[in-house]
Image (tube, grey):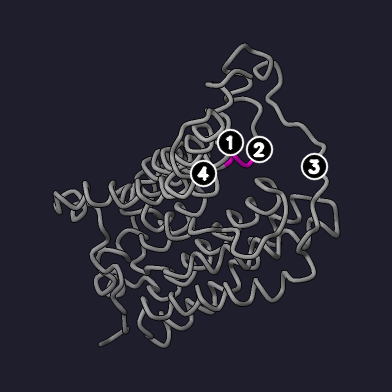
Amino acid sequence: MNGLDLLVAATLSAGTPLAIAGLGLLVNERVGVINLGAEGLMLVSAVSGFAVALHTGSEWLGFGAGALAGAALSLVLGWLVIWLNTNQYATGLAVSLFGSGLSAFAGIPLVGRQLQTGSRHGVPLLADLPFVGPALFRQHPMVYLAIALAGAMALVYYRTRLGLVVRAVGESPVSAHALGYPVRRIRLAAVVLGGALCGVAGAYLSVVYTPLWVEGMVAGRGWIALALTVFATWRPARVLLGAYLFGGVTMLQLHLQAGGVQLPAQFMAMLPYLSTVVVLVLISRNPLWIRLNMPASLGKPFVPGA
């Protein structure tokens, strides 16, 4: 690989967990539930996925364990905010802090262990093409599944009756309830599905991206994924674009350091988060961009018959 195809390949790999988590949070927010617990969900899923992959030798079982862990924790979150009508912001923050502590405790025996990753991935025929082969077609299958997921979500949301119902729940839960749709069950299903996707993203970090367990290894990606939904104005394809943009910034700072660029390492490490803030500030200059697509009931509780 030369420098550019290596950077493109690393960008796709780094952006994939952000894309999967961002799409999961988009599923949550499309029905009106904001999930601030993504960081904790990803941490618990990362340690769960790593433990299962380490003991079974199967990364796909690790992904399954991560998805189950994320879904289970999201089920608790959904029960609290949808059935008990607790404050969505406070509950999400509590889940995030709980997940951070639980993962640190459960991961103590796993510190210093590493997965054996001898498998090489590649799309037959295309992987051997010059430049585009190593840049685009030698990725882990989860990279391509993330891209396919974004396309499938766009299709479901804007071309199917199911998508219309889900968007109606997010826009006006009272109207959807009046039409006979089980609003709270739809919201809970979306929260659990979104949590499972966040879980897959966490497992990707510990099973594929590193592949090891380190306390706090999610390193703010849950918060960046949350910001991605706003950056993307709740559009699946834009979530994908934003994830690879932030993944590219993350990898660029590593390449600059490797290239001997004389800037403090701490400043370079801040670049992905600094770019997140800059993008959000730029988008916020025109509130109409956000209001056009933001679910009208986002963050608001729904009580049937109230």
Residue ID for mark 2:
141
Q: Residue at x 85, y 60 (%)?
A: 55
Q: Foreground: 189 or 93? A: 93
In contact (CB < 8 Å): disc 3 and disc 4: no
Q: CA distance from mark 3 to mark 1?
A: 19 Å
In contact (CB < 8 Å): disc 2 and disc 1: yes
Res. 76 image quadrant: bottom right
What's the residue type where badge 2 is placed? Pro
Q: CA distance from mark 4 to mark 2?
A: 12 Å
Neighbourhood count class around disc 4 (C-alpha, 10 Å): few under 14, some 14–19, many 20 upward? some
What's the residue type where badge 4 is placed? Leu
Q: Earlier in the sequence, mark 3 or mark 4?
A: 3
In contact (CB < 8 Å): disc 4 and disc 2: no
Residue ID for mark 4:
149
What is the total number of numbered labels drawn onto the structure image?
Answer: 4
Residue ID for mark 3:
117
